């Protein structure tokens, strides 16, 4: 039988494909992403790590048991240590000053506030839907693009970080957890999660488009 996560992928195939073929993704695939776009994206992403920490912390507090909490705390640890450190190092090395790239753009704010509001107001299942939406999509484009070369070592590393087995395990855990959560929901609740998943993909598309603003 089709799992719930595969149902979401099927129901939102058009938005999924729009993200997989987003200008940002295809520019990296063809090794032609403008440096200013990547620098701006790094600032937006670095700021989003703080939001992601808040979202995963809310998931820990709303999780149904210790098994889920143990895994999610591992994710939090990676965000707080490895990810934050990577952004500090890469922004310094590229001499990118976040103040030069204001992130109060509609696409960035909708993504950040949309995700954070759902995490604050919503259920554990909704938070799992958010993060499955973000990570499974990201893993897939990075895996495809990692087969092509990127000259900029930071762009290359960024793609690799999201095509590696560790990130695949994280995205797969969210997928399996969502399938398991959905078994305990009625059809109306599943429909609501499907609507939410569609929003996440659209928020992602708009977030990635925002990096092109000059
Ligand atoms: C904007 C965005 N979406 C998804 C991911 C995957 O974690 C990410 N790092 N950034």
Image (spheres, rainbow, N blue to C red):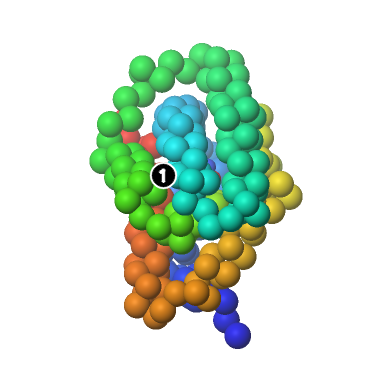
User: Residue shown at 46%/32% (left/top)?
Assistant: 50
| Residue nearest the observer in this picture, 126 or 111 | 126
Q: Position of residue 36 (x, y in %)?
A: 44, 27
Q: Quadrant of residue 2?
A: bottom right
Does 73 appear above or below 81? below
The answer to whether 197 appears left or right of 156 in the picture is: left
Query: Tag 1, which secondary structure?
Result: helix
Q: Is residue 209 visible?
A: no
Q: Residue lying farthest bottom?
A: 1
Whether 24 is drawn above or below 213: the answer is below
Residue 148: percent from the left, percent from the top? 67, 47
Q: Is residue 122 visible?
A: yes
Q: Mark 1 CB in 8 Å range of ligand 1?
A: yes
Q: Quadrant of the C terminus?
A: top left
The residue under the point 60% across, 23% down is: 85
User: How far across and down, in percent of the image, does residue 48 sit?
Assistant: 44, 35
Q: Is residue 79 above or below residue 176?
A: above
Picture residue at 32% right of the left edge, 51% below the top: 121
Residue situated in front as seen by the camera: 116 or 86: 116
Tell me the quarter of the picture where residue 211 sits.
top left
Q: Residue at x 45, y 44 (%)?
A: 58
Residue bearing mark 1: 208
């Amino acid at each position: 039988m089709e799992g719930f996560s595969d149902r979401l992928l099927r129901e939102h195939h058009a938005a999924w494909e729009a993200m997989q073929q987003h200008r940002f993704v295809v520019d990296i695939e063809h090794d032609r992403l403008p440096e200013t776009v990547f620098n701006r994206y790094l600032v937006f992403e670095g700021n989003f790590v703080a939001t992601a920490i808040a979202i995963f912390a809310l998931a820990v507090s709303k999780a149904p048991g210790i098994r889920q909490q143990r895994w999610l705390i591992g994710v939090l640890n990676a965000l707080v240590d490895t990810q934050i450190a990577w952004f500090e190092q890469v922004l310094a090395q590229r001499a990118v000053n976040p103040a030069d790239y204001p992130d109060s753009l509609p696409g960035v704010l909708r993504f950040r506030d949309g995700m954070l509001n759902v995490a604050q107001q919503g259920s554990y299942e909704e938070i799992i839907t958010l993060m499955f939406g973000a990570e499974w999509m990201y893993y897939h484009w990075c895996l495809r693009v990692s087969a092509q070369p990127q000259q900029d070592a930071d762009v290359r590393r960024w793609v690799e970080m999201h095509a590696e087995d560790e990130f695949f395990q994280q995205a797969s855990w969210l997928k399996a957890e969502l399938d398991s959560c959905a078994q305990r929901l009625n059809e109306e609740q599943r429909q609501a999660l499907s609507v939410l998943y569609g929003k996440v993909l659209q928020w992602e598309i708009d977030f990635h488009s925002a990096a092109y603003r000059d």
